[in-house]
């Protein structure tokens, strides 16, 4: 039996599964496969929300452009990347924001690659 090139095998796998499963196909897509994405769904978004409660006197009142140094970090949904947001993770100081963003990205299986600037001082193991 002849061996099939990987690219062709992926294409055949994709076609067979997409015919049989339709919307459930996302669950079976290989982690490193290349897919076409719609405009607006190519980026992965993390949302940071700051709490504003208790800053203004009176119920349901706010001070414009004022917030606490605490809040939550959440992942935005993205069908192209098969990201379904989990529960928001809280942070209590601005120093916590970076580590909470990292936890949210890991929880959703996002892998980051260093950009050009960062590759000047980051070396692959």
Image: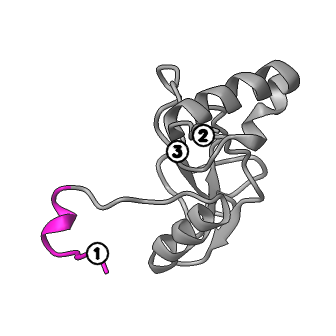
- Quadrant of image for the C terminus: bottom left
Crowding at dot 2, Cα within 10 Å, few <14 / some 14-19 / many 20+, comes out as some
Q: Give the image location of residue 22, x and y in percent.
A: 82, 22
- Discs 2, 3 touching: Cβ within 8 Å: no
Instruction: Note whether 123 is above or below 35 in the view shown.
Output: below
Find the distance from the CA under tag 2 to the CA under tag 3.
11 Å
Residue extent of the magenta highlight: 116-125
For image coordinates 60% across by 50% down, the residue present is 31
Q: Which mark is residue 81?
A: 2
- Discs 1, 3 touching: Cβ within 8 Å: no
Label 3 residue SS: loop
Q: Give the image location of residue 70, x and y in percent.
A: 59, 70
Q: Give the image location of residue 37, x and y in percent.
A: 52, 25
Circle 1 residue = 124
Q: Earlier in the sequence, mark 1 or mark 3?
A: 3
For image coordinates 46% across by 38% down, the residue present is 43
């Amino acid at each position: 039996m002849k061996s099939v090139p990987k690219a062709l095998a992926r294409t055949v796998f994709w076609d067979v599964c997409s015919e049989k499963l339709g919307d459930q196909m996302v669950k079976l897509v290989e982690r490193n496969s290349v897919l076409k994405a719609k405009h607006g769904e190519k980026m992965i978004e993390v949302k940071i929300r700051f709490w504003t409660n208790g800053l203004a006197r009176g119920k349901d009142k706010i001070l414009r452009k004022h917030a606490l140094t605490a809040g939550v970090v959440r992942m935005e949904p993205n069908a192209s990347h098969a990201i379904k947001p989990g529960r928001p993770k809280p942070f209590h100081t601005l120093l916590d924001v970076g580590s909470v963003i990292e936890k949210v990205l890991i929880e959703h299986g996002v892998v980051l690659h260093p950009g050009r600037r960062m590759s000047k001082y980051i070396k692959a193991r």
